[in-house]
Image (cartoon, rainbow, N blue to C red):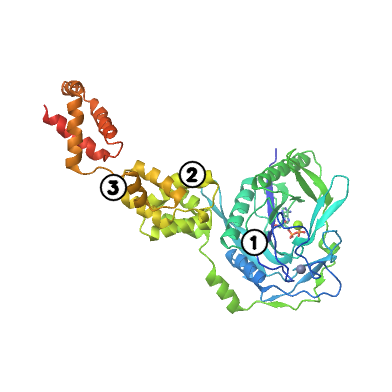
Amino acid sequence: MNRFEAVIGLEVHAELMTNAKMFCGCRVVDSVEAPPNSAVCPICLGMPGMLPAINRRAVEFALRVALALNCEIQAENVFARKNYFYPDLPKGYQISQYELPLARHGWLEISLPGGAKRRVGIRRVHIEEDTGKLTHLDGEGSLVDYNRSGVPLLEIVSEPELHSAEEVYAYAVRLRQILRYLQVNSGDLEKGVLRVEPNISLRPQGSSEFGTRTEVKNLNSFRALAAATEYELQRQEAILRQGGEVAQETRGWHEGRRETFSQRSKEEAEDYRYFPEPDLPPLFVDKAWIDRVRQELPELPAAKVDRYQEDLDLSHYDASVLTEDRPIAEWFEAAVKAGGEPKRVANWIINNLFALINESQQEITSIRVTPEGLVSLLKLVDEETISHNSAKDVLVEMFKTGKAPDAIVGERGLAQISDEQALEHIVSKVLALNAQQVQAYLEGKEQLQGWFVGQVMRETRGKANPELANELVTKLLERRR
Ligand code: ADP
Ligand code: MG
Ligand code: ZN
């Protein structure tokens, strides 16, 4: 039986988190929290005769993304009108870019399960504006909120170079991570500020022609993206195996039934009657602007993962976890800068701090433990002032109260007994109180060693330095032979 190869390209729409909209002075507001139609003006409502003006901050955000995706930047950018009618588009056209997009010919490196890396081509990155938001009432018409209309929107289009649902997932996750690192988009799929639409087709293995594709919309999680891609691949394969033809169309995803369904047949570019936007001059992006934005780009996650492994000797897993979000990576790096040993700091963050953060449903940016605070805590362990176990308790308290670790150790009397004379005194007392067990030990029941150490810990309420206690127990028992 012949096999099929999956061919998939992704269209991603990302709203840009600028203060103002793309072509007017209205604020960009939260689509869920802001009262409907509270951030609108004659320009974004499409009143006749109103003139748009380009928000250069939005262009700068778009440049960040284009450069992070290794694209070539277009020096002269022309905006275009994409004409169509829909109630969420009061102007009757969307200002977009068509023939001359901001950026082209880039690539994004994705990490596949198992650690392999692959570059996926980026066909184009262009600037456009978002539409309003419709809410359909069950049988009672629809509501429209124009707060979103005119919000700067970036369209990022990949080459059809993805070949499985796993690759689609890896691409989307990595792209979202970069958008968040660049602080241009929150990556919130559920709120719709980031929308990922796979174009999916199959072709016989070895064929060089593309098959007919479908595009899947309204996916509001990465899980839905992967599930819908997988479903669509199987649906198309069943059609092709029966000798049928895949219809070129846009399909929706039904989360409850976990299947895609036909929404509308695919429109062609001609249908939009694109033409250059007469109300906007061309946008020139000069080299100086590009150079400055490039220089200001943060270190990106892929580079961080490599550096953490090579320079800081972390495992791939630790490096990946710590770089997932930029604030976490920055917190970690601040702790290392404060003198923390990288591997150890990494362990404390991953094994202890993350649990506290998750439990309290906070972000690392709002917690009361500082990177310097963690490093001072680890120092107390190194100096044997407190045990590793007490340190964990101290961290919990630091997390709750924001107090410095030495203050907590002082208040709670957690300082470990490492003074040899003091501890020897306690060990002697324990042996004196347990003559029977001492006798048994001397007669060969050497496993009692641990029990004596336990008694010392009990006597000191856990504050004895465990290694020293162990040494002294051996020493004093041997002395009785
Ligand atoms: P449109 O804007 O009409 O959807 P584009 O040419 O911009 O068309 O392509 C959109 C996306 O579809 C791109 O990511 C591209 O890689 C992908 N694509 C194009 N042809 C195919 C195909 N035959 N199978 C899968 N994906 C495809
Ligand atoms: Mg499309
Ligand atoms: Zn406006």
| Total numbered badges shown on the rendered structure | 3
| Residue 61 showing in the rendered view | yes
Q: Residue furthest front?
A: 411
Of labels 1 and 3, earlier in sequence is 1
In the rendering, at what x and y percent does residue 254 appear?
Answer: 76, 42
Quarter holding residue 446: top left
Residue picked out by circle 2: 355
Q: In the drawing, what numbered circle is on residue 385?
A: 3
Q: Which quadrant is the C terminus positioned in?
A: top left
Q: Nearer the viewer, mark 1 or mark 3?
A: 3
Mark-to-mark CA distance, 1 and 3 = 55 Å
Q: In the drawing, what numbered circle is on residue 307?
A: none
Amino acid at dot 2: Ala
Q: Nearer the viewer, residue 180 or 114?
A: 180
In the rendering, at what x and y percent does residue 302 appear?
Answer: 51, 58
Badge 1 crowding class, 10 Å Cα cut-off, few under 14, some 14 to 19, many 20 or more, is many
| Residue 4 showing in the rendered view | no
Q: Nearer the viewer, residue 45 or 250?
A: 45
Amino acid at dot 3: Thr
Of labels 2 and 1, earlier in sequence is 1
Q: Nearer the viewer, mark 2 or mark 3?
A: 3
Amino acid at dot 1: Ile
Mark-to-mark CA distance, 2 and 1 = 37 Å
Say what secondary structure mark 2 lies in.
helix
Residue picked out by circle 1: 122
Mark-to-mark CA distance, 2 and 3 = 25 Å
Badge 2 crowding class, 10 Å Cα cut-off, few under 14, some 14 to 19, many 20 or more, is few
Mark 2 CB lies closer than 8 A to ligand 1? no
- Residue 133 shown left or right of residue 371 in the figure: right
In the rendering, at what x and y percent does residue 62 appear?
Answer: 64, 67
Q: Residue at left 11%, top 31%?
A: 479
